[in-house]
Image (tube, rainbow, N blue to C red):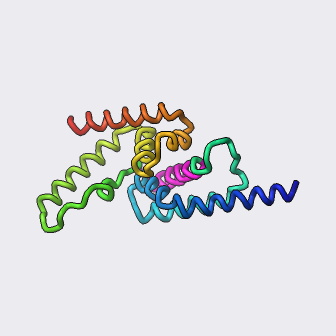
Amino acid sequence: MFRNKTEDLSRKQSAVERLFETHFERVARYIVVRIGNMNDAEDLASEVFVRALRTVDTYKETGAPMEAWLFKIAHNIAVDYLRQKGRRPAVPLEDTLPVAAKDNPGEEAERKQEVEELNRAVAQLSESQRQVLALRFGSEMTSEEAAQVLGKKPGAVREMQSAAIKRLRELLKG
């Protein structure tokens, strides 16, 4: 019995280590979309994996992949960070949009204005809509993967994403 628990723990720790190698960037992108600061997001992504290793013995195999558990940890860490900072989530869209030519100040100013408008619009979305967009576009998850993280059905995630995009369009036209 004891040997099985030790082997199980070792297997889970190895799985977390593999996830670090394959998912660190995705976790960091998810967090940066949630908090708006790349340097802090990378630090928090590291904390996600440290916490996962510390608590891997509590991970229960429920049929959902371990990645879903990992992104729930990332979500909780991002929420804790924002609560401590007393801030609402921010989306650093300037990091995800094409770079304007540095020798064209007009293009750079226009791009900054578009990013500011988009940030204001995203801030008006519901928390669940922002989270779906962060998972789908920030972490480049499929709707099935995002559904596992959110504990929803893939169709519900697609509907939430569609509603979020529709709302963004309305806000940006307004």
Quarter holding the N terminus? bottom right
Residue depicted at 74% across the width and 61% down the height? 10
Which x, y percent locates residue 129? 41, 38
Q: Is residue 119 above or below residue 128?
A: below
Residue depicted at 42% across the width and 54% down the height? 35
Where on the picture, by quarter, is residue 17? bottom right
Which x, y percent locates residue 56? 69, 56
Residue placed farthest to the bottom in the image?
Answer: 103
Residue depicted at 66% across the width and 42% down the height? 63
* Numbered marks: total: 0
Range of magenta residues: 69-88
Which x, y percent locates residue 29? 43, 56
Classify residue 118 as left or right of residue 12: left
Which x, y percent locates residue 41? 45, 60
Classify residue 20 as left or right of residue 57: left
Relative depth, front residue between 4 and 35: 4
Predominant secondary structure, magenta span = helix
In magenta stretch: residue 82: yes
Quarter holding the C terminus? top left
Classify residue 35 as left or right of residue 10: left
Residue placed farthest to the right in the image?
Answer: 1
Relative depth, front residue between 90 and 110: 110
In magenta stretch: residue 84: yes
